[in-house]
Image (cartoon, rainbow, N blue to C red):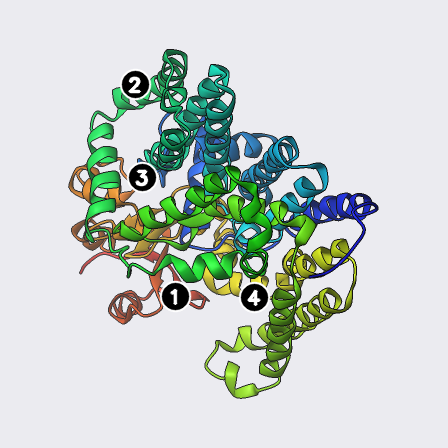
Amino acid sequence: MLSCRALGTSAPLKIWLVVCAVAIAIHLGGPPLLDPDEGRNAEVAREMAATNDYVVPRLNALPYLDKPIVYFAAAAALMEILGPTELAARLPAYLFTLATAALLLWWTRRRIGADEAVVTAIAFLAMPLTVAFARIVIFDSTLTFFIVVAIVAFHEAIETTDRRWTWLAWTAIALGVLTKGPVAIALPLLVAIPYAVWRKAFRALWSSGGLIAFGAIVTPWVWAISLQQPDFLRYVLVTETATRMTTEDLDRAGPPWYFLPYLLGGAMPWTVVAVSSWREWMRREPRIVFLLLWIVVPLVFFSLSQSKRGQYILPLLPPIAVLIGCSWRGLRVRGAAIIVALFGALLLVAASIPRLTAEMAPELIGSTRRTALALGAVLLAGGLVAIVTKRRAIAVIGLSFPVVAMPLLINPLLDALGQRRSSERLAGRISSTFGPRATVIGIEAFTGSLAFYLRRPVIVATPDGSELTSNYILEQYERFSADPASTIKTPSWLDQNLRECCEPRVYVVLRKDVHHQRRLEALGARRFATEPHYLAYAWSGRQGP
């Protein structure tokens, strides 16, 4: 265990906390939007800002009911100010991450102590999953904030019997529901109910004011969207909730232990620190019971669910960070520091072995090696600092430095990856060659980033609508494709379109779709753009088959 005087640690930790908050925003708007998730979610927000319709989310001008409104509305509002940019699309995730850190700082200070609070916030911001999802156009950082507000508020309601905390908890749950659906109800209650029963304060979880607040927040939007999309509630409750959680129909299943590597690795190095320091945080009863419930019960819930994605466990990172704060006076970091240093050394060695990158796309090899070398050096240095120092504050800084430096270190790799997983360059080629009004038709091909960078929806000729990666659009394909104004078209529509003359058109096809490539080339279409996953053809059309 590292020894250090209790005094004199606060100032460097406070400064480092500010550095962490700023560092994870470096190059936030730099890399292109990655498909499918970032491109799709950013395009929904762009269309919301462009149409000023803050009720029905739309993807490619079609109703997109797969997710609720809060993140889309936040990103759309920022796009109204900053324009439809990567920064505006990603900024809500970053800001909600900072808000979660600020909440943990306040609550840990209130319940444990000032230095412990700063360490807690640093540990949360310096977790790989926290950093990753603070920089992605996805809903989980926003959902995590509302879940943490609800769980903390329930804790305070149980401990103080002040019903205002109950109102706050249900308000946060309502906003969480409007961010990602009913999971925002389940997680806080799964944690709070057993704790309330143990503390004999079950009634603290319920109040008429809290339930009224919940209804007052959720009902107006649900009512408004149901007026425009009458099947909204059926789809959300049956397809997006019951089917997702209880069946494998949506192809998101995984083994029961699926989330353990994400939890252990996603919170590194603090999971190792927490295990090593268990004697210290075990002294915090009853608070430690609450924190363990916060980790274990949702982990079991998600593990039993048939829908599994790594980001689902993001709400479990805050209690791990609080465990680190609870352990501050007896923090044990040597084991974690050794692991970090060894991992850095291994990464340096791996980066020097050419055959490890031999199977990669050529444009990724150079940036991958440079990133591995830089990250390996920083991990090795941070781990060594944490090993040799006698000051706990410096050890915390050494362990957290490699994680918060990742946005800077991996940016070249993200830029290179963006050229493979984003349609930014393809959209630029189309716009520069044909101008902003070209008719763009995806033949069984669509990416959200293509529509985002073109600044308009595109026509998609498809047999089922699966290219839009929306379960709702897939379910409603027949209805949408029958509408002449829809951006979804049938294969028979494509046959007719290829016979028409003479408006210039751009056809986008998958690079692996040899059939449609040959068909276009046989008609005389000219290929003018070749990207890793897509090809673009220009054609004015001709009479005849």
Q: Tell me if residue 22 comes above or below residue 183 in the rendering.
A: below
Dot 3, crowdedness within 10 Å: few (<14), some or many (≥20)? some
Q: Are marks 4 and 2 in contact (CB under 8 Å)?
A: no
Mark 1 or mark 2, earlier in chain: 2
Which residue is painted at 56% across and 77% down in the image? Answer: 365
Mark 4 or 1, which is nearer the eye?
A: 4
What is the spatial separation of the Cα atoms under label 4 and label 3, in whole angstroms? 30 Å
Mark 4 or mark 3, earlier in chain: 3
Mark 4 or 2, which is nearer the eye?
A: 2
Q: Are marks 2 and 3 in contact (CB under 8 Å)?
A: no
Name the residue that disc number 1 marks. 526
Please give left or right for residue 129 compared with residue 178 in the image: right
Q: Tell me if residue 50 comes above or below residue 40 in the rendering.
A: above
Mark 1 or 3, which is nearer the eye?
A: 3
Please give left or right for residue 228 compared with residue 110 in the image: left
Mark 1 or mark 3, earlier in chain: 3
Q: Tell me if residue 487 comes above or below residue 516 in the rendering.
A: above
Name the residue that disc number 2 marks. 223
Name the residue that disc number 4 marks. 416
Dot 4, crowdedness within 10 Å: few (<14), some or many (≥20)? some
Element under disc 2: helix
Mark 4 or mark 2, earlier in chain: 2
- In the rendered image, residue 392, in percent from the top left (x then y), is placed at 74, 56
Amino acid type, mark 3: Asp
Residue 326's quadrant in the figure? top right
Note whether residue 438 is visible.
Answer: no
Which residue is painted at 30% across and 18% down in the image? Answer: 223
What is the spatial separation of the Cα atoms under label 1 and label 3, in whole angstroms? 37 Å
Name the residue that disc number 3 marks. 66
Amino acid type, mark 4: Ala
Please give left or right for residue 123 compared with residue 540 in the image: right
